[in-house]
Amino acid sequence: MSKIDFTGRVAIVTGAGSGLGRTYALELAKRGAKVVVNDLGGARDGTGSSDAAANQVAEEIKAAGGEAIPNYDSVATVAGGENIVKSAVEAFGKVDIVVNNAGILRDKSFLKMDENMWDAVVAVHLKGAYCVSRPAMEIMRKQNYGRIVMTSSTSGLIGNFGQANYGAAKMGLAGLTNVLKKEGAKYNIKVNVIVPNALTRMTEDILPPGMQDVFKTENVTPAVVYLCSEQCEDSGRYIVATGTPNGILYCRSQVMTGPGKKFDKVPAAEDIMQNWGEITNLNGARFCEEATELFMG
Ligand code: NAI
């Protein structure tokens, strides 16, 4: 089994000042990566800012013998994203790895969700991935190498009450990945999605109580480390990583298309109703690499 080693690699981990991002940054650095520890240092809802969180994790890495610099920019603006990438290049000369991990929550049921709640959450999760990944991909394209990890959530892939803004942004990241997988392919840029589950300040009042030992951030890190590695040749995969009461689960989740039903002529709406079971049946569902497979396959 080849060892995963990041010696000579430069990684940006956004939102690395706490929770999951911190454990990713520590492990990447432990395995030799030079790490930009980005964190705005605000509250769970995205308000406020502080240098403390990013500083602390960067210092932790250095104390353990690794290389890291802190960065305090917000991922949610183009200027912020460009500056995060610029600080990696200025300190370490390039960018090989981006883990888009920064996140906030502003939960409310949809009818009570005002525009600010919507915009703030979409800005950090979805636009944030654009703001950081775009300038990073420019560098990755020139060097013909890159690994990008997006962070999605079951709130988007499956749905969760009260998280319309968050769920939409998180599913948007899956769509972004589907496209970047194709655009990055010929430059050896692999883009994958982690779907984590861990007890952090983001989930402390959401996850079922008494599960602290089950939902550890450390459970998620090995999957992210693999997705960041040269050895990972896959692209466009959504990988769930979660503790369970009887083991730590890693599995693939994906949009699949069922075999459906073909009609010789345009059916009436009643024919759709009549054949609903066959149209919606997922037995024999498959994953399409190309949209053309839907009608040519
Ligand atoms: P966390 O709240 O501990 O960490 C998020 C970090 O992002 C914080 O340190 C925060 O300061 C930083 N951040 C927020 N806005 C930022 C911005 N504009 N620019 C830069 N940094 C910013 O939460 P956690 O759980 O570690 O979340 C990490 C990622 O994992 C998030 O994207 C979250 O949505 C996702 N996630 C977490 C799950 C879990 O079970 N913990 C489940 C599904 C997804």
Image (cartoon, rainbow, N blue to C red):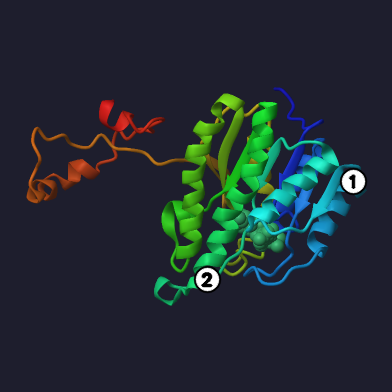
Secondary structure beneath label 1: loop
Residue, disc 2: 117
Q: Position of residue 138 (x, y in %)?
A: 65, 36
Q: Residue furthest front?
A: 79
Is 80 situated above or below 90? below
Toward the viewer: 233 or 93?
A: 93
Asked if disc 1 is less than 8 Å from ligand 1, the answer is no
**Residue beneath the point at 62% across and 50% down:** 131
Q: Amino acid at mark 2?
A: Met
**Residue beneath the point at 50% across and 32% down:** 182
Say which quadrant the N terminus sits in. Answer: top right
**Residue beneath the point at 90% across and 47% down:** 62
Quarter holding residue 35:
top right
Residue, disc 1: 64
Determine whether, in the image, residue 64 is placed left or right of residue 270.
Answer: right
Q: Amino acid at mark 1?
A: Ala
Is 234 situated above or below 18? above
Determine whether, in the image, residue 259 is placed left or right of residue 60.
Answer: left
Say which quadrant the C terminus sits in. Answer: top left
Q: Nearer the viewer, mark 2 or mark 1?
A: 2
Q: Position of residue 251 (x, y in %)?
A: 52, 40
